[in-house]
Image: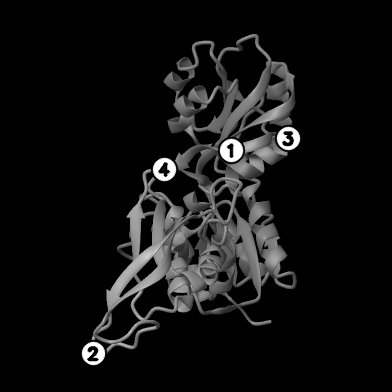
Amino acid sequence: MLMTVKDILNCITEIAPLQWQESYDNAGLQVGDLNAEIHKALVALDVTEELLDEAIAKHCDLIISHHPLIFKGLKHLTPQTYIERIVTKAIKYDIAIVSMHTNLDNSYLGVSRVLADRLGLKDLHILQPLENQLKKLVVYVPLAAAEEVRMAMFEAGAGCIGNYDSCSFNAQGQGSFKAGETSHPYVGEIGKVHFEEEVRIETVVPKHVLNQVVSAMLKVHPYEEVAYDVFALENEFQQAGAGMIGEFEEPMKEIDFLGLVSDTIGSPCLRHSALTGRNIKKVALCGGSGSPFISDALRRGAEAYLTADIKYHDFFIPEGRFLLVDGGHFETEQFTKVLICELIRKKFPTFAAEIAEANTNAVHYFVKNK
């Protein structure tokens, strides 16, 4: 089966659309051609020179990283920085580089969800849902065609609210119109006002699939000119956003929780706030840099919050209300590599995708022997 870079990109963005990335980010294709044929992919958290050499040695023509290699624009390609050296060498060896960063962070099935699953948390929900991601689509349809139009919109991605799909509101009434001389009306006569029994269908649509939902609706709608409206909604989008919150089946002591975290992420060192003396059942977490969501974890009633890159003064914030834990950036995001490989293998079972052997963690630990 012929595979292209675009095929792999589309596979991952099905659960993590590029529209979900933060404004500062640069997710997506970094180096190469979307239409280039590929045979083997190497998956890692970061792109380093050691990783690129591994890709060359293993005859990989695609690298998929979580962290983007290029965050800012490059003004030249010289050997001065590791980024420029990697880009130059990747082009020389015809290796494409794709990064899935904050769009995967913001996916319900993404970075934080994988970490939560590893810890054994249940009843998972997004910690800080995305805003300005929802639209309401309203369309007026003749009674006989209402079911076909409604189902076309649902199949294209409309009508999902939480754990429910096929959600819509339907109200019946009369629509009126007068067909012009050059028109080809589905019902009624040219030059005469016509009244038709119609259904007003309202449904919610995520912004990133709005165009495909509208296209699907227009394709099956019988009218020559379709009357429809699109409204912006201020509702939070519960299927995407930063972090995750869930619960253990049974509460555990704080020291046991720290031990579980250490064993799960393989960290030799955990920084944390003062112990509260209370058991932990409800846990919030955010893989990678999650300091901005400390207040969200508190607001949602978490008894512990696990993330990374916490500043010194942030450890004063809990004030005995919950346990704040810094597990390390690489450590809390490392399972993203497994997630990406599983997504690709599930959709393309015969395509070769493997996790890199190179350790790209830029942070090293010194543990003094007692």
The residue beneath circle 4 is 235
Secondary element under disc 4, as helix, strand or loop, is loop
Looking at the picture, how far across and down is residue 345, in whole percent?
71, 64
Residue sitting at the far bottom? 182
Residue 283, quarter of picture: top right
Q: Is residue 23 above or below residue 299?
A: below
Q: Nearer the viewer, mark 4 or mark 3?
A: 4
Amino acid at dot 4: Asn
The foreground one among 276 and 191 is: 191
Which of the two discs, 1 and 3, labels the residue nearer the N terminus?
3
Q: Nearer the viewer, mark 1 or mark 3?
A: 1
Q: Which mark is residue 120?
A: 3
Cα distance between the residues tagged 1 and 2: 55 Å
Q: Is residue 116 above or below residue 72?
A: above
Amino acid at dot 2: Glu
Left or right: 114 as drawn, with respect to 88: right
**Residue 162 visible to the viewer:** yes
